Amino acid sequence: MTENSAVAEAEALVAEAAGNDDGAASEGPRFTLELNQDQKDIREWVHGFAEGVVRPAAEEWDEREETPWPVIQEAAKIGLYSFEALGQFWADETGLTLPIANEELFWGDAGIGMAIMGTSLAVAAIFGQGTPEQMGEWIPQCFGSADDPKVAAFCASEPDAGSDVSAIRTTAKYDEATDEWVINGQKAWATNGGIADVHVVIASVDRELRSRGHAAFVIPPGTKGCEQGAKVKKHGLRASHTADVHLDDCRIPGACLLGGKEKLDERLARVREGKRAKSQAAMQTFEASRPTVGAQALGIARAAYEYALEYAKERKQFGRAIVENQAIAFTLADMKLEIDAARLLVWRAAWMGRTGQKFENAEGSMSKLKAGEVAVWSTERAIQILGGNGYTREFPVERMHRDAKIYTIFEGTSEIQRLVISRAISGVHVQ
Ligand SMILES: Cc1cc2nc3c(=O)[nH]c(=O)nc-3n(C[C@H](O)[C@H](O)[C@H](O)COP(=O)(O)OP(=O)(O)OC[C@H]3O[C@@H](n4cnc5c(N)ncnc54)[C@H](O)[C@@H]3O)c2cc1C
C-alpha cells in the first residue's frame, strides 16, 4: 500500500466512523475534561470578581469579623449573588459549573465567599424538599433584590446534635385549629443565623422516630419567636456570620412545611408501620452537595499554592531563590499534585450527582474529604514556605490556613466522611 492510499484508507475509516449511525461513534468522544465556552466564560466572570473585589477586601472583613454587606451588594449588582446565577450554575448538565464558580470565588477569599454562598445551603434545602410553589415563593426571598440583598440560613445543628443529627431536640407541633406549626428549640453554629430573612429549620415532628421523624420548615422573615442567640467568634471564615438561633413558640403557617403535610404524613405512616424510610434519597442529596463544598476548599488551597509559588521565586536566601532548593520545589510540586487530584474527585462527584449516577462508593464524601484535607495541608505548607512572613497577618496565607480548617469539620467532619465511605465500600455498619 502506498503512503497516499494508506492515508486515503484512514480518512475513509474516520469518515465511516463519523457517519456510523449506530449511535456510539456519532456522539464523539465520551470522555473529556475540556470545558465548554459557557463554563470558561463563567469561570472568567467569577474569577474577575474574586480578584478585583473579593481579594482586596479579604483582610479588612476578616479583621472586622462582620458580614461584608458592601461586597454582597456588589455581587448582587453584577448578578452573581442571585437565584438566577445559582440556577444558571446548576443548569449545566455536566455538573461542573457549580464547583468551578465556587472554586474561583473562594480563591478570592473564603470568609467573603461563605458570606455570599452561605445562602445556597438554605436554597438547596428548599430546592431539594420544597414543592414548586414553595420554591417559587421562598427561593427569591432568600436573595432579596439587587438593590436590597438578603441572606438565608440553614439550621440543622444543635448544641447536642452535630455529627449525630438524629439527636435533634427542636420540635415542631401542628396546631390544627389555626393550621400552624409551632417550633421550639435552639440551633447552633448557623451560618447567617439571626441575620437571615429566611431561615430553614430542621425540627422533629416525632422524636421517637429520631432522624426519620425530622422535617424541614421555612421560618418567614420577621416571624415572632425566631431570634439570634450568641454570635460565634471563630478561628477562620470570620467574614461569615455564625450564630445560635433561638426558636421560642415560633408560629409559622402550615404551608411552611417543605414538601407539604400530606407527604410528611405518608412518610411517617410508612415508618411507623416498620417500612424502610427512603433514607437513601436524603443520603443521595447530601452526597450531591458535598462536591460544591469540596470545590470551596480547593479554591483556598489553590490560592495558597499560587501565593507560595510566587513568593518562593522572589525570596532569596544563601544567594539564590528559595524555589531552587528541592525541599521547597518538591513541596510546591506536591501541593499542585494534591490540588489537581482533589479537583478530579470533586469534578467526578459533581458530574455523577448532576447526571443522576448512583454514589455506590460515597464518591461525594470522597471529594469533600480529600479537598478539605488538601486545603488544610496546602495552606500549612504555604505558611512554611513563607517562613516568618507566613506566620504574620501581613501575608494572606495564615488567614487561608485558618479558613481552610473548617473544611474538615462542617458539612460532615473528616471522620464522618470516612465512616460514610467505609460503610459504602464494605456494606458493614462500621461504628
Ligand atoms: C463556621 C461554622 C459554620 C457552620 N454552619 C452551619 C450551618 O450553616 N448549619 C448547620 O446546621 N450547622 C453548621 N455548622 C455546624 C457543623 O456542621 C458541625 O460543627 C459539624 O457537623 C460537627 O458537629 P460538632 O461540632 O457537634 O462535632 P461533634 O459531632 O461533637 O464531633 C466532635 C469530634 O468527634 C468526632 N466524631 C463524632 N462522631 C463520631 C463517630 N461516630 N466516629 C468517629 N468520630 C466521630 C468528629 O469527627 C469530631 O472530630 C457550622 C459550624 C461551624 C464551625
Image (spheres, rainbow, N blue to C red):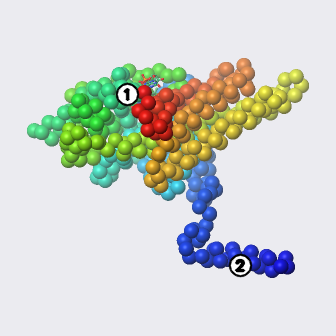
Viewed as shown, does residue 246 lie left or right of 95? Answer: left
Seen from the viewer's position, the closer of residues 420 and 146 is: 420
Q: Quadrant of residue 399?
A: top right
**Disc number for residue 314:** none
Q: Is residue 141 left or right of residue 326?
A: left
Answer with left or right where residue 362 lies relative to residue 32. left
From this view, report whether residue 336 is shown above or below residue 194.
below
Q: Is mark 1 within 8 Å of ligand 1?
A: yes
Residue 164 is tagged as 1
Spot occupied by residue 367 in the image (x, y as percentages of width and height) = 54, 40
Q: Residues within 10 Å of mark 2 (few under 14, many from 20)?
A: few
Report the residue at 55% width, 24% height from top. Answer: 63
Question: How many numbered marks, from 0 up?
Answer: 2
Question: What element does badge 1 sit on?
Answer: loop
Q: Earlier in the sequence, mark 1 or mark 2?
A: 2
Residue underneath mark 2 = 12
Instruction: Give the quadrant of residue 176.
Output: top left
Quarter of the image where the N terminus is located:
bottom right
Identify the residue shown where x is 29% and y is 51%. 131
Q: Quadrant of residue 252?
A: top left
Q: Position of residue 166 (x, y in %)?
A: 33, 30
Q: x%, y% of residue 155?
A: 36, 32
Q: Residue at x 43, y 34 (%)?
A: 428
Compared with 5, 296 (above or below) is above
* Residue 249 visible (yes or no): yes
- Quadrant where the C terminus lies? top left
Say which of marks 1 and 2 sits in front: 2
Q: CA distance from mark 1 to mark 2?
A: 62 Å
| Mark 2: amino acid | Ala
